[in-house]
């Protein structure tokens, strides 16, 4: 399974913060109950790391009210011994962009 970062934004007023916390924590999902919130630093988002087969499956974990405005990012771990793979990946992206 792949890992994804879910970034779930909400409005910055107290009511919206309370609502987001309540909705995410009351889903019963193990993932949602381990959400990290940035509200106390004036960043009104929650971040959750989940395991899923693909982005669509990861997005489906997000409560419906927040699903469309949330960001889903596939996470990759890099290591120094695999740095060449990263260079090849970026080179291929640049070549594709230039040929488009």
Image (cartoon, rainbow, N blue to C red):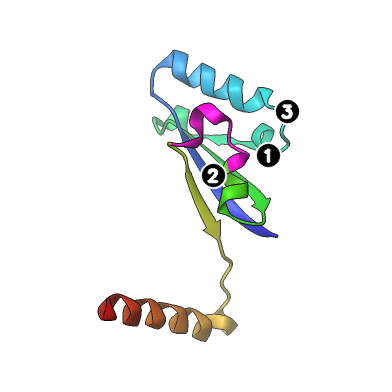
Outermost residue, top side: 15
**What residue sits 44% from the left and 82% below the top?**
87
Residue 4 location (% of width, % of height): 58, 53
Residue contact between numbered discs 2 and 1, judged by CB atoms under 8 Å: yes
Res. 17 mark: none
Q: Mark 3 packing: few (<14 Cα in 10 Å), some, or many (20+)?
A: few
Q: Mark 1 packing: few (<14 Cα in 10 Å), some, or many (20+)?
A: some
100, 19: nearer the viewer:
100
Magenta stretch contains residue 78: no
Secondary structure beneath label 3 = loop
Residue 67 location (% of width, % of height): 51, 35
Magenta residues, as a range? 60-68
Report, in whole angstroms, how far the alpha carbon at label 2 lies from the one at label 1: 10 Å
**Image height check: is 56 above or below 16?**
below
Mark 3 or 2, nearer chain start: 2
Residue named by callout 1: 31
Residue named by callout 3: 28
Residue contact between numbered discs 1 and 3, judged by CB atoms under 8 Å: no
Residue named by callout 2: 6
**What residue sits 60% from the left and 41% below the top?**
60
**What residue sits 58% from the left and 67% below the top?**
77
Magenta stretch contains residue 66: yes
**What residue sits 53% from the left and 23% below the top?**
20
Secondary structure beneath label 2 = strand
Residue 23 location (% of width, % of height): 59, 22
Residue 33 location (% of width, % of height): 68, 32
Outermost residue, front side: 100
């Amino acid at each position: 399974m792949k890992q994804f970062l879910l970034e779930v934004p909400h409005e910055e007023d107290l009511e919206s913060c309370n609502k987001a916390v309540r909705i995410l924590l009351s889903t019963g999902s193990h993932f949602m109950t381990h959400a990290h919130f940035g509200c106390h630093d004036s960043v009104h988002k929650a971040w959750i790391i989940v395991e899923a087969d693909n982005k669509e499956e990861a997005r489906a974990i997000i409560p419906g009210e927040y699903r469309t405005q949330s960001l889903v990012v596939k996470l990759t771990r890099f290591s120094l011994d695999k740095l060449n793979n990263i260079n090849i990946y970026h080179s291929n992206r640049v070549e594709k962009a230039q040929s488009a």
